Image (tube, rainbow, N blue to C red):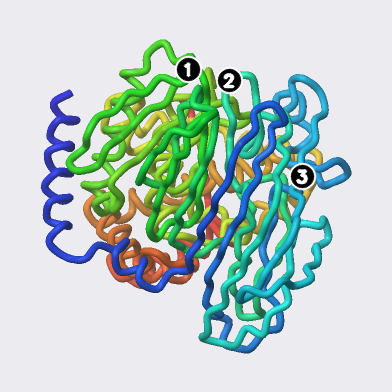
């Protein structure tokens, strides 16, 4: 408890100092794309009706003749590539198969109605014709209806909660080749997005308690419900979770309000304290948390948890529930503020968030770091040894989501091995230099989609150019992770 109080005090001091100058959020928000979404949820039909306006700048460096959006909600339709691996189907769909989709009812560009096409190998990209010159902005309006599946996933309804993650058409991020229309994969988080400003209005039955990525700007009573308006500046995505069973607890960490929305957690105060402690610890060690609020939502979810800006979904009653709260909180820095290509380099945020979880659990005297590392080494070496009994050439490289044979391989090579990479850096550099490198990485790459080279450069700046060999050996599968004993 003494450590936690000291950490909270240090975080408060950092947050107060950060208020003296424009924050990373204020700076980034001035040049962001803009989303305005007005939607309403019908709990009888489990549908979300919406009108969305997006004003976006062409940052591709060349003129293009269309503006493209990922429509991830279409991944839930019958016949689509499943949103979960076969091994998770019974957990995700406890009531049997259920389907959802997004139906686009109309589109406009610069106020004029335009024909649109649904493209992509899995009908997951919306394309609107537009003469979109480099460096110029275009405004598009999309009217659509999302039908939710009965599924314990990012987007879906269950008996206790409604998850609204990745529900809206989101601009395909720019790459050197143009807009990135990479399809959805059912392992990992198949998303790459730039930060944007959001203004989201939700009309819903007033029996629901709603948690959102944005701050509540206003609420007004309707004849049959309530209308909430949320705003968020410079966030990488926007999500909501709602339930007619939610209770809410809140505490302040400096100037940040941390809220916990729960319906079944029998020790909610401890869960909230864990989220507050992790937020304070990462604020002290890396950089002050740059937003005014953070919400953790107990929800029905087939995995341990899922990160969104200023909001984390955590699976109700999960075996690793406590770990997930910390892990998703670590993602607020790495994924949220400092982005990365989660499709091609998932180890960058997942491996780092997993190791930061180990560090906080050691600091908070939950699990010693040595034990966490030992567990990870055992998991990794056992997995590789078992595979080597059947295959002579096991791929142990860091790689993109489409290159993993199954979810187990993804978890071991991304979370477990990724965590071991950062532990090697931690042991090599020591705590002070390790966090100095992370802070440098944060400062240089906040509000961008960072590359592995940028991360490597920050660690080499602090630890010397030879530090690059640690990254390279892990990336190429040439690292030496020794056998260990109890």
Secondary structure under badge 2? loop
| Depth order, front residue of 438/477 | 438
Residue 478 located left or right of residue 454 = right
Q: Which mark is residue 101?
A: 3
Local packing at callout 3 (Cα closer than 10 Å; few below 14, some 14-19, many 20+) is many
Write down the quadrant of residue 261 in the picture: top left
Q: Between disc 3 and disc 1, whose residue precedes? A: 3
Q: Which residue is mark 1?
A: 263
Q: Note whether 344 is above or below 253 in the view shown.
A: below
* Quadrant for the C terminus in the image: top left
Local packing at callout 2 (Cα closer than 10 Å; few below 14, some 14-19, many 20+) is some
Q: Between disc 2 and disc 1, whose residue precedes? A: 2
| Depth order, front residue of 443/310 | 310
Secondary structure under badge 1? loop
Secondary structure under badge 3? strand
Q: CA distance from mark 2 to mark 3?
A: 21 Å
At 75% from the left and 56% from the top, the residue drawn is 105
* Position of residue 265 measured from the top left corner of the image (x, y, whole percent): 44, 15
Q: Note whether 301 is above or below 77 in the view shown.
A: above
Q: CA distance from mark 3 to mark 1?
A: 28 Å
Q: In front of the other: label 3 or label 1? A: 3
Residue 235 located left or right of residue 379 = left
At 55% from the left and 65% from the top, the residue drawn is 54
Q: Between disc 2 and disc 3, whose residue precedes? A: 3
* Position of residue 273 measured from the top left corner of the image (x, y, whole percent): 29, 25
């Amino acid at each position: 408890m003494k450590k936690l109080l000291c950490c909270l005090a240090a975080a408060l001091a950092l947050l107060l100092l950060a208020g003296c100058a424009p924050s990373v959020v204020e700076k980034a928000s001035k040049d962001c794309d803009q989303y305005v979404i007005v939607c309403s949820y019908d709990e009888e039909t489990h549908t979300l009706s919406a009108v969305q306006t997006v004003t976006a700048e062409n940052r591709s460096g060349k003129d293009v003749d269309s503006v493209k959006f990922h429509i991830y909600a279409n991944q839930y339709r019958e016949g689509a590539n499943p949103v979960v691996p076969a091994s998770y189907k019974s957990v995700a769909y406890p009531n049997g198969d259920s389907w959802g989709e997004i139906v686009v009812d109309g589109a406009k560009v610069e106020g004029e109605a335009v024909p649109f096409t649904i493209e992509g190998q899995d009908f997951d990209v919306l394309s609107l014709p537009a003469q979109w010159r480099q460096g110029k902005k275009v405004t598009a309006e999309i009217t659509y209806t999302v039908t939710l599946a009965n599924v314990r996933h990012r987007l879906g309804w269950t008996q206790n909660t409604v998850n609204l993650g990745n529900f809206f058409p989101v601009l395909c991020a720019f790459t050197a080749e143009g807009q990135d229309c990479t399809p959805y994969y059912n392992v990992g988080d198949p998303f790459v997005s730039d930060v944007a400003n959001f203004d989201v209005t939700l009309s819903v039955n007033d029996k629901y308690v709603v948690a959102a990525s944005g701050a509540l700007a206003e609420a007004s009573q309707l004849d049959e419900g309530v209308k909430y308006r949320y705003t968020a500046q410079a966030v990488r995505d926007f999500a909501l979770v709602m339930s007619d069973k939610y209770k809410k607890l809140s505490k302040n960490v400096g100037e940040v309000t941390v809220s916990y929305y729960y319906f079944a957690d029998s020790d909610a105060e401890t869960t909230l304290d864990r989220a507050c402690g992790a937020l304070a610890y990462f604020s002290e060690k890396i950089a002050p948390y740059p937003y005014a609020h953070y919400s953790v939502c107990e929800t029905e979810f087939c995995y341990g948890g899922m990160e969104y800006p200023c909001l984390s979904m955590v699976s109700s009653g999960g075996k690793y529930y406590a770990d997930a709260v910390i892990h998703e909180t670590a993602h607020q820095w790495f994924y949220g503020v400092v982005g990365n290509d989660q499709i091609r380099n998932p180890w960058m945020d997942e491996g780092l968030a997993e190791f930061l979880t180990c560090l906080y659990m050691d600091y908070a005297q939950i699990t010693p770091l040595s034990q966490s590392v030992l567990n990870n080494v055992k998991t990794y070496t056992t997995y590789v040894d078992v595979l080597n009994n059947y295959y002579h050439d096991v791929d142990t490289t860091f790689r993109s989501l489409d290159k993993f044979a199954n979810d187990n391989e993804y978890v071991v090579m991304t979370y477990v091995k990724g965590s071991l990479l950062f532990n090697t850096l931690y042991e090599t550099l020591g705590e002070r230099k390790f966090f100095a490198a992370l802070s440098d990485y944060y400062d240089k790459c906040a509000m961008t989609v960072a590359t592995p080279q940028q991360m490597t450069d920050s660690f080499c700046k602090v630890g010397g150019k030879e530090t690059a060999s640690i990254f390279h050996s892990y990336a190429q599968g040439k690292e030496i992770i020794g056998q260990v004993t109890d």
